[in-house]
Amino acid sequence: MLETEGDREARQRIEQAQQEGAITLDLSNLKLTELPEAIASLTRLQRLDISYNQLRELPKSIASLTQLHLLNLSHNLLTELPEAISSLTQLRQLYLNNNKLTELPEAIASLTQLKWLNLSTNQLRELPKSIASLTQLHLLNLSHNQLRELPKSIASLTQLQKLYLCDNQLTELPQALAFPTELRWLNLSTNQLRELPEALASLTQLHLLNLSHNQLTELPESIASLTQLHELDLSNNLLTELPESIASLTQLHKLDLSDNPLNPDLAAAYEQGTEAVLQYLRAKA
């Protein structure tokens, strides 16, 4: 295959990194269709950016980069990850967003130091149970996929603080609500949720909850347990009323009820702002 300008540039950057013993390498935006095998020689690399290329697969030689802390593979054409990724046990940040992944290998269980995993804008239909091994994760972005359900094993991610699940095909949440209880941010917008389980009450550390663009007709009384909630987005649902218990959410500063068929009294209160809604609910209690 003829060497392109991008291939030459990549080869030169790899050679230079070799000579300098570099720990950072940027191969982004070079229109690469494959990763040069010479990348395997850069065993000291800690940060590798290969984003915005045209990679369809990764070479097995990626396994040599055992010191990587950050790997950016976003905006490529990857349909799968090689088992060799299991060798990258020092990874802290892994960006795989905007690819064409349909599944994750069980080998992802080896990446036990990951704190940041972005898998948004792929074609994932399910998550492997092995995701439970990523116990150091602080952020997991699964938005813009095709997930229909969540594995119970996600509850094992006890350090998780931000979870993005918007624009999937979730129709329900498990009654046991297998979410890590330390969550601060939870985005479930643009799914097909019709109801929420009472077990929502376990997410007592939530600061932001986005439930917009679903099919909710009511909320559980247990939402009153989310005492740290600052923002609640319920826009574009089928709500006519709110549970009176929401009035006890003293930290709530932003409430979005737009594009719901609210009853006239609640709609009038909403026009005056969040505090007016809370006062309306207190008056009803």
Image (spheres, rainbow, N blue to C red):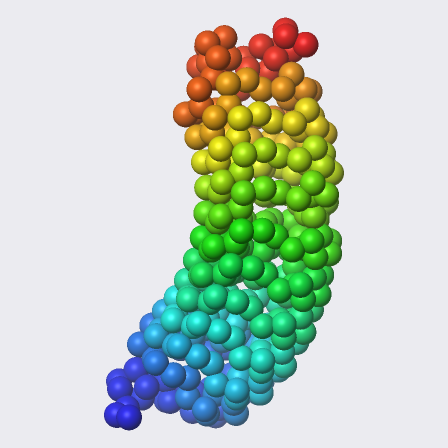
In the rendered image, residue 127, in percent from the top left (x then y), is placed at: 59, 61
For residue 178, above or below residue 19: above
146 or 107, nearer to the observer:
146
Residue 141 left/right relative to 258: right
185 or 180, nearer to the observer:
180
> Residue at 70% across / 48% down in the picture?
178
> Residue at 46% across / 41% down in the picture?
190
In the rendered image, residue 240, in percent from the top left (x then y), is placed at: 50, 18
The count of marks equals 0
In the rendered image, residue 37, in percent from the top left (x then y), is placed at: 45, 91
> Residue at 57% across / 25% down in the picture?
218
37 or 108, nearer to the observer:
108
Can residue 4 be seen here? The reply is: yes
> Which of the image's four quarters has the C terminus?
top right
- Res 93 quadrant in image: bottom right
Can residue 16 be seen here? The reply is: no
> Which of the image's four quarters has the N terminus?
bottom left
In the rendered image, residue 176, in percent from the top left (x then y), is placed at: 72, 43
For residue 128, above or below residue 226: below
> Residue at 58% across / 51% down in the picture?
149
- Res 159 quadrant in image: bottom right
For residue 157, above or below residue 36: above
Residue 119 left/right relative to 174: left
- Res 261 quadrant in image: top left
